Amino acid sequence: MSLPRTQSERIYTYDHEKYTENKINRSASGIYQSAAVACDSAVGSSVGKKILEQGGSAVDAAIASLLCNSLLNAQSMGIGGGFFMLHYSKKDEKVTVIDARETAPINSSHDMFKNCSKTKGGCAIAVPGEIKGYWKAHQMFGKLEWSELFKPAIEMCNNGFELPASQAKFLKYCESKIYESVPLRETFVNRINNEIYKANSIIKRPKLAKTFEIIAKEGESAFYNGTLTDTIVDEIQSAGGIVTRSDLQSYECLVKDPVTYKLKNNVVLNSVPPPSCGLLLNFILALLDGYDHPEFSLDFAETSAQFNHRFIESCKFAFGLRHLIGDYVLKDTDRLHQIMNNENLIDEYRSMIKDTCHPIKLYGSTDFRIDHGTAHTSLIAPNGDAVAVTSSINLVFGSKIMGENTNIIYNNQMDDFSCPSSEFNSFALPNYKINYVGPGKRPVSSMTPLIALNEDKTVRFVCGSSGGTRIITSTALTSARNLFLNQDLVRSVDDSRIHHQLCPDEALFEDSFDQDVLESLSARGHRLINFGHGGSAVQAIERLPDSRLHAVCDGRKGGAPDGF
């Protein structure tokens, strides 16, 4: 049987961060006694470790790591974007959610994109939440001085850092946009030969260093109601954006409780409530938890095909509920909460998973849309605290707008809203009204960090991913392999992945996926599409039976863990 090897180009372009092409890079891993950091840049992990060694908290280490990662993965995240963070306090045995998702400007409306772009330029920029979120997290859980957390990133900006291969590839892909923009050109083009910087070139960002220095000295108010505010507003509005000073002044970072689910083995899953898709992640794992999973299921074609079929079907039912997720403050998610709090309803959904596929309408609504372009950090501190944080500016290099004075790359998160003037977003995903643009609203996001706790309240597993719609499925698949099948974490991350988001009705598989398993899945009715390799990158840490920490950074994007 010959299976298709074509990519679904209408969804997966370089704008959507396809990290590697038809190439498997073994993930970097490390085993540590007390603390571990898994970031999608090796420098970010190293900086996080050093902050912990200095007596910093898990949040201190995460913030310092994120600031450095915003340089090394500038195509994915930065202070012009936003994030979701899970924080676990071992002392209090409590998980806290920090929601620093971007919001729509006050002057926005659901029909504002009739005459302007949703994906690039000023109109695509939502109110950034990154710095406000760092500040809130530090106020609640920080130990070191705020300014200390900026020193590694400031030093990198001033002294220079090696351009990672992943960022160099996306710079090349966005070459025309880089040359069109004076700030981007000054930052990423070699003045000697007028060429885009290549991998391993030394990059300096002195203007961003000054921005960091001001925020380090003055705190979050410098960004939202102080020294930098008017400059930020001018940079956005000069690009055609509608963010105002009032938008920045009124932005609020939200503190929430996690959405949770207890597995049969008493491990408790903790993820982020709407507008994150944490409920969908928990739902997929809840469905899979109802099956018996022999430990070596993935080593044999027949049992592996059964596991992957059930995984695909669980994903399809989850994405069929996706239209129920909207901004948390709108309280439109009661139905999903009811399902997750009712084992009978979960059993009912599981009973609909048969040995073959159903017509697509049986799975639920196909009206949804999701974002892309992210970076993730997982971290466990010596005192047992943990952080899982996923940050984003949406598509590659966000809105393609960089501030001439601040050197901030601004997000294009307005594309994550649904819009009645267009049938699909940049992922070929249909629109739905609950996610229409509205003043102050937060768009729905696929970012789904996860912290799993043992019955004794120790951290069992910390995980998260980058990769748009595939954040949900790659985090779920890695978690299921490790938590249900007791698969080694490196293999859980490295083994070929399969993805289904219901619309389009396609199961996307990686190049090296087992041929016998694919033939079995095809026989069960799945339409299979080969998308090469990459597209999502997982950063995860597991606690081993002897209490040591095993950290893994996905080879699809690069990076390496660190710890002690």
Image (spheres, helix red, strand yellow):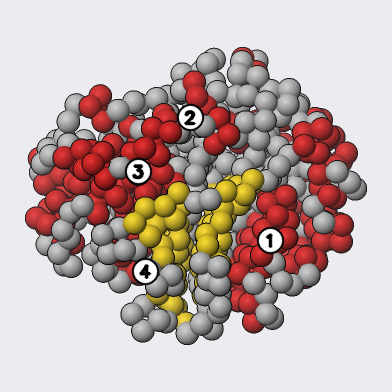
Image location (x, y in percent) of residue 562: 53, 76
At x 30%, y 58%, the residue is 263
5 or 116, nearer to the observer: 116
Residue 112 falls left or right of residue 84 = right
Residue 289 falls left or right of residue 162 = left
Q: Earlier in the sequence, mark 3 or mark 2?
A: 2
* Quarter of the figure with residue 544: bottom left
Q: Earlier in the sequence, mark 2 or mark 1?
A: 1
Q: Earlier in the sequence, mark 4 or mark 2?
A: 2
- Marks 1 and 4 sit apart, C-alpha to C-alpha, by 25 Å
290 or 423, nearer to the observer: 290
Q: Earlier in the sequence, mark 1 or mark 4?
A: 1
The residue that disc 4 covers is 455
**Which three-letter amino acid code belongs to the residue tagged 4?**
Glu
The residue that disc 1 covers is 140
**Which three-letter amino acid code belongs to the residue tagged 2?**
Asp
Q: Secondary structure at mark 1?
A: helix
25 or 234, nearer to the observer: 234
- Marks 4 and 2 sit apart, C-alpha to C-alpha, by 31 Å
Please rate how many residues cluster around mark 3, counting C-alpha atoms within 10 Å: few if below 14, some from 14 to 19, many from 20. Answer: many
Please rate how many residues cluster around mark 4, counting C-alpha atoms within 10 Å: few if below 14, some from 14 to 19, many from 20. Answer: few
The residue that disc 3 covers is 340
At x 15%, y 44%, the residue is 521
